[in-house]
Image (tube, helix red, strand yellow):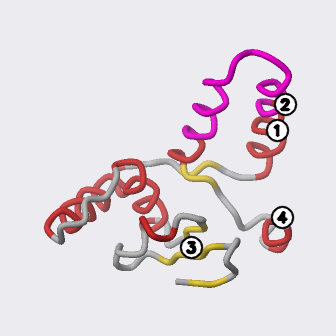
Amino acid sequence: MERMREYDGLTVIAAVVWHELLFGMSRLPDGYRKRRIRTYLYDVAAASFPVIPYDDSAAAMHAEMRADAERGGTPLSFADGMIASIARTNNLLLVTRNTADFSAIPGLYLEDWFAGGES
């Protein structure tokens, strides 16, 4: 949370990540927990973080990255490729706790705020 406050106004959410957050919430049974998460996502997250789209530039970058990863013998998950391509085409730092799945992508700037380091 400290890092989020430090970069207030400078953080965004990739459209794919927004989808994953909403999908996870939508899978929950109706009830208090789902209502709280929905409220947080729409009233806090959506109000605080612009959603960056997966557009034609990201799609082209994604295609190249997938082909390179496949040729290198380390296939890239489709969703991770979408996220990485959005970050690369927008010249953004990708903040993730899952740096292992992204570390082999050339030209992608990564940081794990939980580990406190940069890749």
Q: Contact, CB < 8 Å: mark 1 with mark 2?
A: yes
**The disc label shown at residue 36, or none:** 2
x and y percent of residue 105 in the render? Answer: 35, 73
Does 31 appear above or below 68?
above
Q: Is residue 37 left or right of residue 20?
A: right
Q: Contact, CB < 8 Å: mark 1 with mark 4?
A: no
Does 35 appear above or below 96?
above
- Between 22 and 51, which is closer to the camera in this rendering? 22
Point 42% across, 65% down: residue? 101
Look at the image and give the residue range highlighted in magenta.
19-38
Q: Is residue 36 magenta?
A: yes
Q: Is residue 66 left or right of residue 46?
A: left
Q: How many marks?
A: 4
Q: Which residue is mark 4?
A: 1
What amino acid type should be assigned to the residue bearing mark 3? Leu
Point 41% across, 48% down: residue? 79
Q: Which residue is mark 3?
A: 93
Quadrant that contains the N terminus = bottom right
Q: Which residue is mark 1?
A: 40
Q: Is residue 54 left or right of residue 76?
A: right
Q: CA distance from mark 3 to mark 1?
A: 24 Å
What amino acid type should be assigned to the residue bearing mark 1? Tyr
Disc 3 crowd rating (10 Å Cα; few below 14, some 14-19, many 20+) is some
Q: CA distance from mark 4 to mark 3?
A: 17 Å
